[in-house]
Amino acid sequence: MITASKSDAVSQDGLLPDLPNGPLSEYRRKASFNWKDMAMFLEDEDIIAFKNKIFSTLESDPLFYRQPGVDLPLEKYRELTFLRCKKIFEYNFLTFEATMEKPQKMLVLINCLGMYDWSLSTKYFLDTQVFGVAIGNTGSERHETILHQTQNMEIFGCLALTELSHGSNTKAIRTTARFDASTKEFILNSPDFEAAKFWVGNMGKTATHAVVYAQLYTSDGRCHGLHSFVVQIRNPKTLLPMPGVMVGDIGRKLGQNGLDNGFAMFHNVRIPYENLLNRTGDISSSGNYTSAYKDPKQRLGASLGTLSSGRVSIISMVVTNLKLAITIAIRFSATRRQFGPTEKEEIPVLEYQLQQWRLIPYLAAAYALDYFSVGFFFNLIELQIGILMKDRSPRQAELGKEIHALSCAGKPLASWTAQHGAQECREACGGHGFLAMNRLGDIRNDNDPNCTYEGDNNVLLQQTSNYLLGLVQSIHEDNAPCESPLGSIHFLNDYKTILKRKFTASTIRECLDCAVALDAYKWLVCYLLRESHDKLQQEKQRAANDFDARNNSQVYYCRSLALAFIEHTVLQRYYDYTHDPSTPGSLQPVLKKLCCLYGLWSLNKHIAVLYQGGYFAGELPGRIVQDAILDLCAQLKDDAVSLVDAIAPPDFILNSPIAKADGELYKNLWSAVLQGEKVLERPSWWPEFCCNKPVIGKPRSQL
Amino acid sequence: MITASKSDAVSQDGLLPDLPNGPLSEYRRKASFNWKDMAMFLEDEDIIAFKNKIFSTLESDPLFYRQPGVDLPLEKYRELTFLRCKKIFEYNFLTFEATMEKPQKMLVLINCLGMYDWSLSTKYFLDTQVFGVAIGNTGSERHETILHQTQNMEIFGCLALTELSHGSNTKAIRTTARFDASTKEFILNSPDFEAAKFWVGNMGKTATHAVVYAQLYTSDGRCHGLHSFVVQIRNPKTLLPMPGVMVGDIGRKLGQNGLDNGFAMFHNVRIPYENLLNRTGDISSSGNYTSAYKDPKQRLGASLGTLSSGRVSIISMVVTNLKLAITIAIRFSATRRQFGPTEKEEIPVLEYQLQQWRLIPYLAAAYALDYFSVGFFFNLIELQIGILMKDRSPRQAELGKEIHALSCAGKPLASWTAQHGAQECREACGGHGFLAMNRLGDIRNDNDPNCTYEGDNNVLLQQTSNYLLGLVQSIHEDNAPCESPLGSIHFLNDYKTILKRKFTASTIRECLDCAVALDAYKWLVCYLLRESHDKLQQEKQRAANDFDARNNSQVYYCRSLALAFIEHTVLQRYYDYTHDPSTPGSLQPVLKKLCCLYGLWSLNKHIAVLYQGGYFAGELPGRIVQDAILDLCAQLKDDAVSLVDAIAPPDFILNSPIAKADGELYKNLWSAVLQGEKVLERPSWWPEFCCNKPVIGKPRSQL
């Protein structure tokens, strides 16, 4: 067992202050490990110090003060979000050099701001990263000024792809950009309001510039497909729209209302031809179109390529939401007492098996998915370095395909887990979970669009299953092994052997080894791959076209395949990590339990398929898997509080009275309620009750 | 096939105006039935006329005008909700006599108001029904004035049961009411802030009177358990709190923000002893406690009995939410086009099997649960008539128990189905589903508390499983048959035979007969009953006490049992209804498909258990059930638009631009967006961007 050395302890205490004593102390005492050791294991000192700096800066700046659960008018919320965003520019938490040195810090910054408020984080992220990176990745030297202006907030950016009538089907985008050879300008046009750019974050009120995706037409009338252009939509000196641009705000949303989402229509707006982001295609001085790609499909892929890194970031963001939600629900459950073995004594609701089963698997998921998201981000960095280095090796191409496949299933898995987890946490906190100040609503609502943007979850999953189905031929020809840079498909080389396997565990104890779930997942992926492939072949023979055949192979087949595959990947990576000899001995037991619980709990959703395909037989397998899940929940319940302590942000950031680190649930809640505006005052409209009495059955006109 | 006669058609056209032509017409033409016939079959003319009256009254009163998606400040929303509530009193849609004649109309009114806005509906319902009925059912002649004052809105009521630290465990309520013999008063006291009444609807700003639950103490210091008292909390002339009452608003919630939920603490508040609601227990003139019940447990049951009808109403309310959500999602999906077999042609997303599978089962659930909720309401009326008639027969007692068991599982099933359905509908509408004006967020958020109030869903389910476990002895002694007034447990008489059965269907076609799902459910309930009983016995031997034994038998056992039982009941009732010879031949095919789809889709969640227990064996059963689900979805997709037409309220009430009856998705959405406040204006804080530029890395103080 590894214990912290003296110098470790000193650095720990500086980085991780002790948590206050109170009603949570009892659970903390019962924990099998030290939460500070865990925190220091999950993130390095540098990252923890970076987070601390961000958190303490926000906490000590009155601009960032929040009243829990307060009802801000939309415009006020947007103003505050903008002012805070500007302040983040001023704080400049992350210099360009620091980002280059440790790119992960950008994600940490985004998540720290998100833990505070996703509207702020998204606003900042869309401008500096999505807009900035789109220009950096698809533009050229001539666009450097724009980057510079973005960094100084001289201009403010957004990325305008989707239109009112087109989201998922980006190829069908209808905005046009026609080259006018006489003036060397592009003329941007929205053919009608259905082609208005729509849903664009930052466009509603603040953006001065947009990267606009449009169909490029040369003067000869030929269409060269979707390209992106920098378009000035507002005057940075006045924030008034540019001539010919109709730009506005799409209104209130289900969440992230501090962010202004907008629309824009272009009425023959002329922009200099240099505004074409010309990495993949350009117009020569003579007005001819030139492209780095011969195949238009390849060009489209490259043009949309800048969007794929968004999914990797989203995985990390939604995991952050899951961590927030589960922190709130676990701390609440450890301090909320209801019923008990005798009438005199009430026990914390966390002691109930049902409550454990509702929450602790999501805690395990938060740990497992968090690990995946960090590692996957490094995989992305590797890919991006390759792109920067102009690596044209087959490995680089394969890495791109694998990351695409993993991100297209990873985002759905993680965002749904966070969404369902947030709802479960809200319900598990009962009425108090429904009170806005306790924040579970905001977490759920701010998380929700992650299921949709950067690709609808259900649509994205097809990308992953397509990738896997593309491997079937190599699998059948034994001489072409399944190889991929990240190894996520290596196990498919044993496809035939795996499919012959059966579940062999016969006791709960055996199921407490995570290898059991992992083996079952390997079988599951192979089985679903075979079934999906067969289904697709059948449908191809039956259907009118491949389009229909593919559509009719999704439910119960390709969709399940993509999810099972990503769950396996997440589990395999977490298994390797928790079983690594370098993992501290003091933490390994609890981490292995989390790994096993995540594995079995995820697997439990597929038990019908395990039976159907014959991997399970008889009553025993289903029963011992479920008993093992409950057993692990019971084993982990005394560790749950410390497990959330290790991932929770400070109280100011978490901003949930029922989940403060001191565990004084009712005192904090009551105090927050009493701080509400006009909480004890009668309403301003009291005479409407006291004087203007209704005459029953005689409505008076209001006019 | 039954066709409408001429006079029917005339009355139909008066009651149900034709729907406008537009992009939805094609699906309407393809429907297998006439939506007006369906509407007239689902509800009688009188009810339809009543609904029309409510809807058209609201639509023509400017007080009820709404801007879709508008952002109302909390206080403004509450004021509007109060004014609208007062107007509902003035409109007096339902006289006392009309309610007596057709009690169902009260539920129709609540739902019509809810379709408009749940805050309004709940506000009205809590005052007139929950507060009013509590007094009517637990008070006596001396409380009639209060009822009269409520009806005239001289006073405004709320029901105060839960406290800050106690919700589910009502027995542990800590507010006290001590009888002072010298003044013949009760002294109401909250021992500390944790015993503050909390979450009480209408208490935040408007209620003048509360029915308060408190522990009754006689002057000799003896506690007689929980009783209810009418307490004046505010002065109706000023809306200022009464002396000793600290009353306030708990703040913003995740939904229903037009309703003011509040808290109250009582500091030795004296109330006349007549304010005790004395149906179950009273204080004699000499200060002695007298009770109609010998057993305190029985008294508690009777005292809380008034709450149980709430659950029956909630089932109907949440089904209303499901109907709204699915209407929006189906109409959107029938008009939103994305991708297609060729690049030129895009098809409605409803044509995708995946979209059908996501939505059409919820449409089927809306129909099946709606039928259940209406029938179950009539069962409740029967029970209530028995109570009024002082029926003390064993049948009446059994009816009470059965309705309790069904409502304790019916509310969880229906509220979760609506909650998950609303989320699925929001996601199925993509980004536009995330836009507040399209209303899916409000539906989901307003539906959410139904999972918690009137009993947390998970806690309630135990009541149902306890009822079923109580039958096990009769089942084992064959001579004591399972009998219940509503027949929901009759099939358990064949328990032993049923458990021996196996799934026998071998083709998709066979599964299209709803009897297949029904048979499987019968086996499932019997199996889970046996397993739960055995588990409980095992746990009793292992655990320290019965409390632990019961808690450790919930997950995968008792909880699943309660859900399977209620799903069976809903399905059985819908099966009998759709297969009844009196159901019109023109509607029967589509109704049977809905029944079958609901059955198989619900059953599909239990397939693991069906395999585990040996009812299913091999690949075939799981596969044909799933194929049948997809087949039914495909069969129903052309009927889906007409099926929602038959249950949708008018556009004004539905209030969702993407789901208007004319199907002009984009025109309506675009027009609603452009009507937004200051939609095209620059923000008021524009100089914060244009003039006060940030200096990167140099934060300025905000003070």
Image: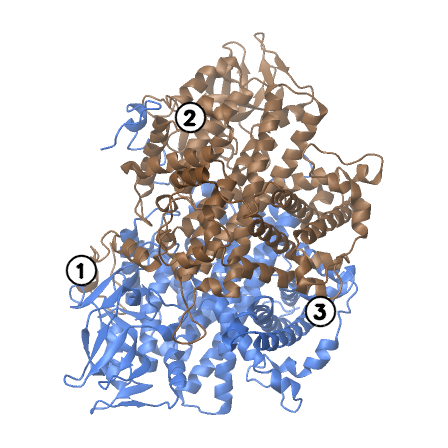
Chain colours: A brown, B blue
The image shows residue B106 at horizontal and vertical percentages of 40, 72
Q: Is residue A265 left or right of residue A301?
A: left
Q: Tell me where residue A296 sits by quadrant.
A: top right
Looking at numbered disc 2 in the image, what kind of residue is underneath it?
A: Val
How many marks the image carries: the answer is 3
Residue position marked by numbered label 2 in the rendering: A245
The image shows residue B132 at horizontal and vertical percentages of 31, 75
C-alpha gap between disc 1 and disc 2: 48 Å
Residue position marked by numbered label 3 in the rendering: B613
Tell me the mark number nearer the camera, choosing from 2 and 3.
Answer: 3
Marked residue chain, label 1: A
Mark 1 lies on a secondary structure that is helix
The disc at residue A479 is none
Residue position marked by numbered label 1 in the rendering: A687
In the displayed structure, A34 sits above or below B12; it is above
- The answer to whether dots 3 and 1 both sit on one chain is no
Looking at numbered disc 3 in the image, what kind of residue is underneath it?
A: Gly
In the displayed structure, A69 sits above or below A178; it is below
